[in-house]
Amino acid sequence: MSDTVCLQEWTSILGNSNSVIQSQDKWVDLPPYQDVALYVEISANSSASLTIETSPTREEVFFAPLKDALGTPIAYTGSGLQGVAVYSAANGAAQLPARFMRWKVSGSGSWTIGFRVWLSVQPPHP
């Protein structure tokens, strides 16, 4: 049976040629889970890119964006439900989430974005 974890409730962010990273107290600590399905919904977006990052520790240097099966970092740039990304050892995912997960929004010029992120997480199989 899976659990549902909120990485981010609805939020709106404005920027100008910069990046905004989720505050550390809101990062999700994944243990004891192994498989993750990522649900991203964007209500409004003008020139922003949302990535979900993962790291084995809380140290900035280790955070990296989640990647697709080809090893390309996933950047959400549209609006609406962004498709479900599943990261599971059972389905041969190229990259599995590490212990911590957070979001990062970047853009060039003036940008705005409204979004929320939910995770469906699976405990390890016995």
Image: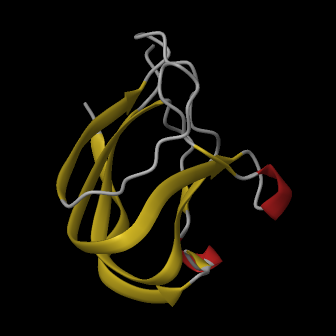
> In the image, residue 121 lies at what x, y percent?
37, 39
Instruction: Name the image colouring.
Output: secondary structure
> In the image, residue 3 lies at what x, y percent?
29, 44
Relative to 79, 49 lies left or right: right
Of residues 9 and 94, which is closer to you in this image? Answer: 94
- Compared with 13, 32 (above or below) is above
Q: For the point 43% across and 16% down, which residue is it? A: 125
Residue 67 visible to the viewer: yes
Of residues 38 and 51, which is closer to you in this image? Answer: 51
Q: For the point 35% across and 57% down, which residue is it? A: 77
Q: For the point 37% across and 53% down, which residue is it? A: 76
- Compared with 49, 83 (above or below) is above
Residue 36 occupies quadrant: top left
Relative to 74, 100 lies left or right: right
Figure disc tally: 0
- Compared with 101, 103 (above or below) is below
Of residues 96 and 107, which is closer to you in this image? Answer: 107
Location of the N terminus by quadrant is: top left
> In the image, residue 102 lies at what x, y percent?
54, 61
Residue 59 visible to the viewer: no
> In the image, residue 94 lies at what x, y percent?
56, 19
Location of the C terminus by quadrant is: top left
Q: Residue furthest front?
A: 109
